[in-house]
Image (spheres, rainbow, N blue to C red):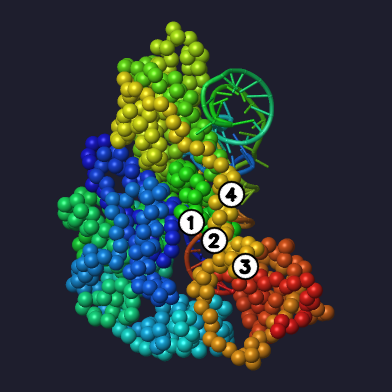
Amino acid sequence: MSTKRQILVTAALPYANGPIHIGHLVEYIQTDIWVRFQRLRGHRCIFICADDTHGTAIMIRARQEGRSEEALIEEMQGNHERDFANFGVSFDNYGSTNSDENREKCAVMWQSIRDAGLVKEQDVEQLYDVEAGTFLADRFVRGTCPDPNCGAKNQPGDNCSVCGITYTPAELIDPVSTLSGSTPEIRSAPHLFIELEQLHEFLEEWTQSDEHLQPETANYLKGHFLGDPKSPEGRKELKDWDISRPAPYFGFEIPDSPGNYWYVWFDAPIGYMASTQQWCNKHGEAFDDWWRDDATEIHHFIGKDITYFHTLFWPGMLKSAGYNLPTKVHIHGFLTVAGEKMSKSQGTFVMAATYLNHLDPSYLRYFYASKLGPRTDDIDLNLEEFVNKVNSDLVGKVINLASRTAKFAHGLGLCETYPDDGGLFKQGAAAGHEIAEAYEKCDYNRAMRLIMELADRANPYVESQEPWALAKDPDKSERLQQVCTVALNLFRQLAIYLAPVLPKLAEQTGELLNDSITEWEQSQTPLTGKPVSKFKHLMQRADLKKVEAMIEESKQEEVPQDTSGESSFQDSDQPLKDEPLAEEITIDDFAKVDLRVARIIQAEHVEEARKLLKITLSLGGEERRTVFAGIKQAYDPEKLTGRLVVMVANLAPRKMKFGVSEGMIVASGPGGSDVFLLGVDEGAQPGQRVH
RNA sequence: GGGCCCGUAGCUCAGUUGGUUAGAGCAGGGGACUCAUAAUCCCUUGGUCGGGGGUUCGAGUCCCUCCGGGCCUACCA
């Protein structure tokens, strides 16, 4: 460890629209481990983050909740910071994109981009909700698909979910605002665009240089956005980026364009800088030492969903404004639970706060560490594996070393000179290089494997030396002290290596051996001559029952509790917010929709389709309908056969990629694996109309 | 449909630039110990490295192809 590096690390800014869940925590834990590792190595490393607070979603939500945006984001920020603190995420500064510092940094960045000649103005036609007094983002508009061959109703503002064509919200037929239910009008407004294509050469070089991005990410960018000058398809043109939104918008007004606001994705990454500025102010540091100094490394940790912003726009912005470019953008995958996407109905969408009601955060930190590698693959949280791994690795192997020897050493303390241990400590010290390298490369699962190999060598040592037998013979207390000195030193060495992952364990180890763990180098020299404190349990075993209770509680957050008390149902108001009530209709309007009870007589997978099942419905007698339903991820076709469902029977047949669909089966839910078919009570018969 | 990635013991994964009889942890089986949070230690069962073809003196490792899975994108809800 020669030179002291200066490193600025960021994790993505969580959006102020929702609480932290275990999926978010993959990133914050991953980043925190890296930061703690760098600090332990003696480098200067600051960990910067903030809440991402701007945008339409926040504005709308605040309005629905009848309070100011500021009040909303303040509450969310409090929740976020509390959750992070409870998981040991050690930010040096946690700011907000809605801060003076951020407004300033945005203005500076903006001026630079203007000066670089990257900004152009262009009118954009958008729907405007007169009642709500706001322009409508695509997802707040629904209407009829403009394609004459399709004409599907109730489609979102950017593309038709039935025929798939894309359009602008202004092209929708009979558009309806989901905010007010009124009919929006088309209004044209000037928007500001950044011409990213002007930076094509630079981005090509920066992304493909092999230094800043994981290879799969560089590849992705080349394939989807940049193109390849050497391939037959040639290079692709980068699209202009619309970075302004007309008022009203919760965000910062653009200084030289009154009435227009920076789009949330413009000011969010600048939030990294603003939060750094806050930290600098508090610590008397110079901002430019961190953002305009080639000697400083900047590392961003993000999820693959926001790759685009951090690997194209952000470097482009930084380059234009003359700031440091990211040294590395570390991109991780998503979390699945038990092999599937997190699901509210299955209780696997676990909030950080819910987790903490049942389990120790150290478990999750270790488990994620044992799963995370340097690549963008998704990681899976299998609940049984989680319990087994924590118990056998941490409690059984590592902590066991201390708990089986500390008791004997309590009165004796550690020897003055480190005894012969057959080379065990030395081997462990040597492995430190490889372990450090793995941490540095974000290859935590390798680091954990290497550490556990060391633990696997330490326990047999204790076994062979039989300290419990030595303890019975007063003449052998010197030998007992030697054995305990070795075992506790091997344990401490592991605790140091694990310190980035398990800071609490490192702290407890410091207390036990009266020498706090502050540097990686401490793993290279045995500790001697220290008293040994009275042993306290260092970690509880993980209990599968508690894991199950956590899942149960997570289910109850979304599914109503079936308590017998009157009006004790605590249904969330989220579904209604997600999809507000449609415009009022008459009974005649309703009568146009012919809903029928139908029996599924056949259901099969459509091999090429990801979401569709091909279903044959019977309306009684010989009446059959073939329907393609997007429920593949939620239902097993074999279990559907025979079941009664409700279908829209007079829907115009639609030609789809895999055949003609002659109706729709009605279901609720957001989609994916969260789709819920409507059931029909006993006694109903196929063909009966639903009135 | 297009792009990327993956497929090694029941499970989670290692397998360096192709080189001797393919490894670990957990789980399983047998034994030992009793200091320790039913922890630990010793021994042990278990794999035609997804299938097939090719290159090579030699392939889990390279190439082709097929099958299966994941992600992105499109399509679909």
What residue sits right under mark 1 in the picture? A351
Q: Is the C-beta separation of discs 4 and 3 under 8 Å?
A: no
Q: Residues within 10 Å of mark 2 (few under 14, many from 20)?
A: some
Q: Is the C-beta separation of discs 2 and 4 under 8 Å?
A: no
Residue under the image location 70 percent in, 84 percent down: A691
Q: Is residue B11 left or right of residue A294?
A: right
N-terminal label among 1 and 2? 1
Q: Mark 1 or mark 2: which is in front? A: 2
N-terminal label among 1 and 3? 1
Q: Which mark is residue A557?
A: 2
N-terminal label among 3 and 2? 2
Q: Is residue A276 visible?
A: yes
Please identify the quarter of the rendering in which residue B59 is found: top right
Q: Mark 3 or mark 2: which is in front? A: 3
Residue A526 vs A646, above or below: the answer is above
What's the distance in space between the residues labelled 4 and 1, CA to CA?
Answer: 14 Å
Callout 2, which amino acid? Answer: Glu
Residue A229 vs A651, above or below: the answer is above
Q: Residues within 10 Å of mark 3 (few under 14, many from 20)?
A: few
What residue sits right under mark 4 in the picture? A548
What residue sits right under mark 3 in the picture? A566
Q: Chain of mark 1?
A: A
Callout 1, which amino acid? Answer: Met
Q: Chain of mark 3?
A: A
Residue under the image location 75 percent in, 67 percent down: A641
